[in-house]
Image: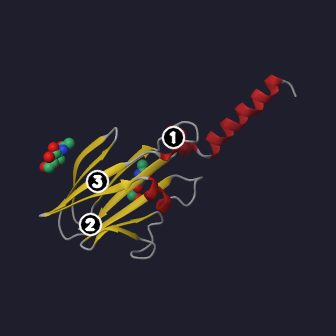
Amino acid sequence: MNHSGNCFIFTLFILACYLVTPSLSFCGIGLRRPWNVSINNFVPGDIVVHITSTDHDLGNHTISSNGKYYWTFCEKLFGRSKFTGNFRWGSKFQTLALFDREIVDICEFDISSDQVCHWIVNPDGFFVSGTNDPFPKGWAKKKTW
Ligand SMILES: *[C@@H]1O[C@H](CO)[C@@H](O)[C@H](O)[C@H]1NC(C)=O
Ligand SMILES: *[C@@H]1O[C@H](CO)[C@@H](O)[C@H](O)[C@H]1NC(C)=O
């Protein structure tokens, strides 16, 4: 096969990837995966979370009891994205990694679909899951208040 034939096949392959997984296209070619990280508040009262990464400040968000907040982003190449959350609940404070290599290992279970990570904040602490099964099955506790 000549060189331009190879290019044509390659182009078809890339196009097919976009058609099969249209949700990946907003992050560009495959290596940068889209993530959706959500925080569910199950403490009896408002919590305030301030989320930052090395290049983003998502600001302060008040999440009411039984409410949720989520954000989406494209993973950096080679999985170096990192988000930290500063939480306040009344007089209590806590800081923890909401997204880093260790959290990716917990949340990723199907690299062909959109990646989701769910957090639950309750009076006992902070729990993370990639499957969002009914609590507490499959939820990893990362910190207490
Ligand atoms: C992100 O996840 C949250 C919680 O599961 C969901 O409500 C929301 O629709 C998702 N957003 C996007 C853009 O996928
Ligand atoms: C978020 O709230 C904290 C505490 O009230 C404040 O110090 C900080 O400046 C706020 N950050 C933003 C980006 O609004």
- In the rendered image, the quadrant that contains the C terminus is bottom left
Question: Looking at the image, do the residues carrying marks 2 and 1 touch, with CB atoms under 8 Å apart?
Answer: no
Scheme by which the image is coloured: secondary structure
Return the mark for residue 66.
2
The residue that disc 3 covers is 85
The residue to which callout 1 is attached is 77
Q: Amino acid at mark 2?
A: Asn
Report the Cα–Cα distance between label 2 and label 3.
18 Å
Q: Which mark is residue 123?
A: none
Q: Estimate the spatial distance between the alpha carbons at disc 2 and disc 1, rounded to whole Å.
A: 34 Å
Image-quadrant location for residue 62: bottom left
Q: Which residue is most to the right?
A: 1
Residue in front for this viewpoint, 47 or 88: 88
Density class for disc 2 (Cα within 10 Å; few <14, some 14-19, many ≥20) is some
Q: On the picture, is 124 further left or further right than 79?
A: left
Question: Which residue occupies the foreground of this view, 44 or 51?
Answer: 51
Q: Earlier in the sequence, mark 2 or mark 1?
A: 2
Q: Quadrant of residue 88?
A: bottom left
In the depicted structure, whether residue 119 falls above or below residue 138: above
Say what secondary structure mark 2 lies in. Answer: loop
Contact? badges 2 and 3 (CB < 8 Å): no
